[in-house]
C-alpha cells in the first residue's frame, strides 16, 4: 500500500509539473497577458459610418505568426497603462526591436525593408491624396496573409530542434526559427497564395483605376506559362515577388527596377529554379500582356488562326459524321422499303 501511494503521488507531481510547464510556455508566448482581453472574440470599438475597428488577436494566429516570440509592447511602445488611451500610435515596423543580430551587438530592424517600401510603387507618394495613398498596401496588408505564417513541417521542426539544442538562448536560435519558417514556401500552393494576394489589388478595377494601372496584368499572367504551371502544381515556378521583388517594387521604366529592360535578363536568371541561361531575346518575351492587334498583332492573329483552324476542323469532322450517319439511315430505310 505505501508503494502504491508513492506511485500515485509521483504521478500527481509529474502531472502538476506538466501543467506548470504548459503554463510557462503560454506565459512566455504572452508574457504580459495581453491576450486575456485581446483574445476575446469580436473585441473592438465602433468607428465612423458604423465601421468596427477590431482588436481581436486569436491565440492561434499569434502563436503561429513570425512575431510569436515578441512581447506586444516591443512594437506597441506607447502602451504603458491600462485601460489604454483612446488614441494610440501606429506601429512603426522600421524601429529597432527585440532581436539582436547573430554575431553582432546591434539590434535588428526592418529599416531596410521600410525604406525600400517607401520608395517603391507601393510607398507613400506626396503628390497623392491621403485617400489614394491609403489605398496602397502597407506592411500588414501583405504580412498578415496566411503564406507568411509559420509552416508546420516535420523535417524543418526536427532540424530546428537539432540546432536550438546548442544555440538556445542565443540570437542565432531566433534566426534559425525565422529562416526555417519561410524556407519551405517554394511550393505551388504558397506561390498561388502570393499571386492571389497581389491579385486582390491588381484585379480590383475600382482600386487600380486610381493609379491608371493596366487591369490585364493578372489575366495575362494566368494565361502564360508561369500562371498555367502553378495551376498544374509545379513548385519551382516564379510568382509575382520573384520578379517584382518583395519591398523594392519599382515601375518598369525606373532604371533600378528589377523588371527594367536593362535588368530583366538578370532577373530571369537570378534564382536556381528559374532560367539560369536566359538570353536577352528570351528575357524580352511577354509575361503579362494580352495580345491585341495593336501591341502584338503577330501573336494575336496566330492565336486566332489556330482557334479558327481547330474550330473549323472540328466542325467539318462533325459534319462528316452527321452526313455519314444520315446516309446510313437513308440506306437502312430504303432496304426496309424494298422488302
Image: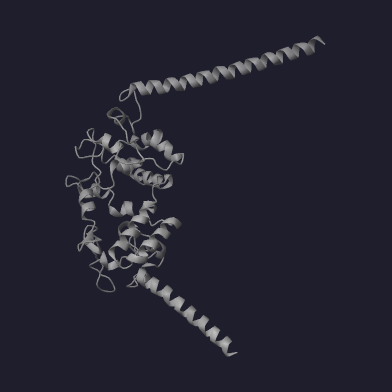
The reply, left or right, for residue 75 in relation to residue 144 is left
Residue at x-position 31% and y-position 32%: 278
Colour scheme: one colour
Quarter that holds the C terminus: top right
Residue at x 30%, y 23% (from the top left corner): 294
Q: Position of residue 246 (x, y in %)?
A: 29, 47
Residue closer to the observer: 186 or 26 = 186
On the question of residue 153 being in view, the answer is no
Of all residues shown, which one is farthest toward the bottom?
A: 2
- Identify the residue at the far right of this view: 339
Dividing the picture into quadrants, the one containing residue 171 is bottom left
Q: Is residue 309 above or below residue 250?
A: above
Front one among 76 and 256: 256
The one of 193 and 212 positioned closer to us in this rendering: 193
Q: Quadrant of the N terminus?
A: bottom right
Expressed as whole percent of the image width and height from the top left, the position of residue 86 reads: 26, 67
- Image mark count: 0
Residue located 35% across and 21% down the image: 298
144 up-or-down from 317: above or below: below
- Seen as rendered, the residue at the extreme top is 338
Q: Position of residue 29 (x, y in %)?
A: 36, 68
Q: Residue 242 placed where, x, y %?
A: 32, 42
Residue 262 vs residue 292: left or right?
left
Amino acid at each position: 500500500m505505501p508503494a502504491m501511494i508513492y506511485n500515485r503521488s509521483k504521478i500527481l507531481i509529474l502531472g502538476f509539473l506538466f501543467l506548470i510547464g504548459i503554463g510557462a510556455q503560454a506565459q512566455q508566448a504572452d508574457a504580459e497577458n495581453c491576450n486575456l482581453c485581446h483574445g476575446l472574440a469580436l473585441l473592438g470599438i465602433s468607428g465612423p459610418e458604423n465601421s468596427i475597428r477590431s482588436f481581436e488577436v486569436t491565440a492561434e494566429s499569434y502563436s503561429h505568426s513570425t512575431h510569436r516570440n515578441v512581447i506586444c509592447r516591443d512594437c506597441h511602445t506607447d502602451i504603458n497603462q491600462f485601460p489604454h488611451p483612446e488614441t494610440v500610435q501606429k506601429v512603426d515596423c522600421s524601429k529597432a526591436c527585440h532581436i539582436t543580430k547573430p554575431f553582432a551587438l546591434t539590434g535588428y530592424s526592418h529599416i531596410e525593408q521600410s525604406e525600400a517600401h517607401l520608395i517603391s510603387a507601393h510607398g507613400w507618394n506626396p503628390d497623392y491624396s491621403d485617400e489614394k495613398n491609403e489605398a496602397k498596401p502597407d506592411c500588414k496588408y501583405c504580412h498578415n496573409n496566411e503564406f507568411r505564417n509559420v509552416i508546420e513541417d516535420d523535417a524543418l521542426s526536427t532540424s530546428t530542434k537539432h540546432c536550438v539544442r546548442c544555440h538556445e538562448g542565443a540570437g542565432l536560435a531566433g534566426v534559425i526559427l525565422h529562416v526555417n519558417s519561410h524556407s519551405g514556401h517554394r511550393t505551388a500552393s504558397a506561390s498561388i497564395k502570393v499571386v492571389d494576394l497581389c491579385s486582390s489589388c491588381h484585379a480590383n478595377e475600382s482600386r487600380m483605376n486610381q493609379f491608371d494601372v493596366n487591369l490585364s496584368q493578372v489575366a495575362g499572367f494566368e494565361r502564360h506559362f508561369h500562371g498555367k504551371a502553378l495551376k498544374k502544381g509545379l513548385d519551382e515556378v516564379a510568382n509575382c515577388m520573384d520578379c517584382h521583388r518583395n519591398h523594392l517594387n519599382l515601375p518598369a521604366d525606373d532604371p533600378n527596377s528589377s523588371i527594367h529592360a536593362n535588368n530583366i535578363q538578370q532577373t530571369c536568371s537570378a534564382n536556381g529554379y528559374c532560367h539560369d541561361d536566359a538570353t536577352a531575346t528570351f528575357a524580352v518575351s511577354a509575361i503579362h500582356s494580352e495580345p491585341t492587334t495593336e501591341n502584338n498583332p503577330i501573336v494575336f492573329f496566330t492565336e486566332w488562326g489556330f482557334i479558327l483552324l481547330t474550330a473549323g476542323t472540328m466542325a467539318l469532322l462533325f459534319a462528316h459524321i452527321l452526313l455519314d450517319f444520315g446516309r446510313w439511315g437513308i440506306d437502312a430505310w430504303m432496304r426496309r422499303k424494298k422488302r
